[in-house]
Amino acid sequence: MNESAFIIHAPILTARWGLFVVHGHWAEASVERVMDAGIMGGRTTGFAPNEQITRAEMAVVVERMLKQLGK
């Protein structure tokens, strides 16, 4: 088996905010913005941009956004 094939096809990950973010994901820039703004923080295993968000998680996002708007 060719070991270099695994390297070529492996996703590129970076540690940021104590989490792993996949480079090249279509939402990478948006993920960085909401994390930098403190609106979202990801999960213990990483940001998981392809996972569904729960109602509880969405409530936290809305509350954080309203705080930033001063409401």
Image (cartoon, rainbow, N blue to C red):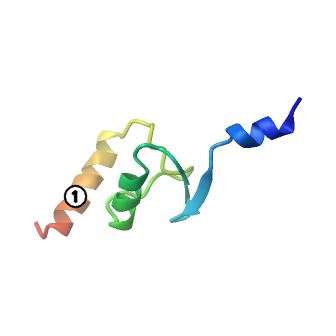
Question: Residue 4 falls in which quadrant of the image?
Answer: top right
Image spot of residue 51 (x, y percent)? 44, 37
Which residue appears at 35% of the width and 39% of the height?
A: 54
In-image side of 16 versus 4 (left or right): left
Q: How packed is label 1: few (under 14 Cα within 10 Å), some, or many (20 or more)?
A: some
Image spot of residue 41 (x, y percent)? 42, 58
Residues 39 and 22: in front is 22
Furthest-left residue in view?
A: 71
Report helix, strand or loop for mark 1: helix
Question: Residue 71 falls in which quadrant of the image?
Answer: bottom left
Image spot of residue 56 (x, y percent)? 31, 45
Which residue appears at 63% of the width and 44% of the height?
A: 11
Residue annotated with mark 1: 63
Q: Is residue 52 above or below residue 39?
A: above
Q: Is residue 8 above or below residue 41?
A: above
Furthest-right residue in view?
A: 1
Which residue appears at 39% of the width and 36% of the height?
A: 52
Residues 1 and 35: in front is 1
Residues 36 and 54: in front is 36
Quarter of the image where the N terminus is located: top right
In-image side of 8 versus 69 (left or right): right
Number of callouts in the render?
1
Which residue appears at 17% of the width and 61% of the height?
A: 66
Q: Is residue 57 above or below residue 36?
A: above
Q: Amino acid at mark 1?
A: Glu
In-image side of 40 versus 20 (left or right): left
